């Protein structure tokens, strides 16, 4: 697949660049998603109509036509009429059940193709693992994806990042507050992976600093981020009437920041030879 060159009309200023799609889905994006699913899964796509009727649409399977070409048309018609958020849920459902197709396609390759398409159509979401999350920058997305594929020695930390991404991308009601909790918990979990069983994050980071040769300013910066999530009206405490709202910007930032910091810590720990002897919590 090639990159996405800027069209001629945009290059000469006749057409403005498209806006990032965070609250809807253009007909072009919807058609592209459908075509990708149909063309990539091939004959297996039509044969899945009954399963999709039962497990996704939750309707009587008898409504699905028995002839293949009619079943394909039926499925396309149902998809085209879904609200934009449900259309994304449909694609997520397919990704999460790829192993049901025979033969099963490569999840990594399949999701990679979807992300390429979402980027081309200026969608405001990308797949991180098997979950669609809102994005603003491809480099930030790469940091989260790298954290999700960290080595087995940090499986618990990786799961916290995964849960943070799920909560951030939850639709129609994203859980920003708990997404932030999961993001910061990934760093706490990593410290425990190295046998540092101190409460909070300040003391574990102090110990990590000694073991991994972290700069004091870097440790202090992340401790301040932790403090943001732990103050009296903060995110890690019960919701209070005067709690400051946590929105997409805060949750997105914490997911990216914690993912990038986790990647950094994993590299430093690997260089120091500390992960090989550690046990997954």
Image (spheres, grey):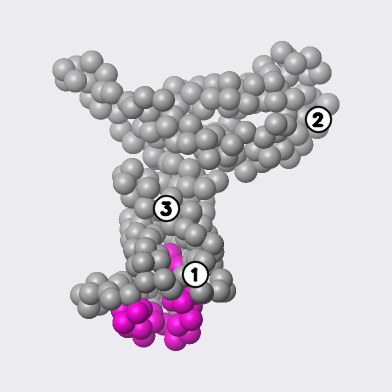
> How far is the residue under mark 2 from the one under mark 1?
51 Å
Displayed quadrant of residue 93: top right
> How far is the residue under mark 2 from the one under mark 3?
40 Å
Relative height, residue 195 to residue 91 (above, below)? below
Q: Can residue 227 be seen from the camera position used here?
A: no
**Residue beneath disc 2:** 61
Other residues around mark 1 within 10 Å, as few (<14) / some (14–19) / many (≥20): few
Would residue 242 be found to the left or right of residue 169 on screen? left
Circles 1 and 3, Cβ within 8 Å, touching? The answer is no
> How far is the residue under mark 1 from the one under mark 3?
19 Å
**Residue beneath disc 3:** 146
> Which secondary structure, mark 3?
helix
Relative height, residue 38 to residue 96 (above, below)? above
Q: Is residue 200 magenta?
A: yes
> Which secondary structure, mark 1?
loop
Q: Position of residue 162 (x, y in %)?
A: 51, 57
Which span is picked out in magenta?
Answer: 183-211
Question: For the point 48% across and 23% down, which residue is it?
Answer: 32
């Amino acid at each position: 697949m090639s990159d996405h060159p800027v069209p001629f009309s945009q290059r000469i200023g006749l057409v403005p660049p498209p806006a990032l799609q965070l609250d809807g889905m253009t007909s072009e994006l919807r058609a592209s998603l459908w075509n990708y699913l149909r063309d990539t899964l091939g004959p297996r796509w039509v044969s899945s109509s009954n399963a999709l009727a039962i497990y996704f649409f939750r309707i009587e399977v008898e409504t699905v036509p028995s002839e293949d070409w009619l079943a394909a048309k039926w499925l396309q018609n149902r998809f085209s009429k879904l609200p934009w958020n449900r259309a994304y849920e449909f694609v997520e459902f397919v990704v999460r059940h790829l192993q049901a197709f025979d033969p099963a396609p490569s999840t990594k390759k399949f999701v990679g193709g979807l992300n390429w398409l979402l980027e081309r159509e200026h969608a405001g979401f990308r797949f991180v693992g098997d979950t669609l999350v809102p994005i603003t920058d491809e480099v930030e997305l790469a940091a989260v994806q790298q954290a999700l594929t960290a080595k087995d020695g940090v499986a618990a930390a990786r799961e916290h990042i995964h849960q943070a991404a799920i909560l951030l991308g939850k639709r129609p009601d994203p859980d920003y507050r708990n997404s932030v909790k999961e993001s910061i918990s990934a760093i706490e979990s990593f410290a425990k992976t190295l046998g540092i069983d101190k409460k909070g994050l300040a003391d574990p980071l102090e110990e990590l600093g000694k073991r991994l040769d972290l700069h004091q300013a870097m440790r202090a910066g992340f401790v301040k981020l932790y403090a943001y999530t732990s103050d009296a009206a903060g995110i890690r405490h019960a919701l209070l009437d005067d709690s400051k709202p946590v929105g997409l910007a805060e949750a997105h930032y914490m997911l990216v920041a914690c993912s990038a910091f986790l990647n950094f810590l994993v590299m430093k720990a690997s260089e120091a030879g500390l992960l090989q002897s550690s046990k997954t919590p």
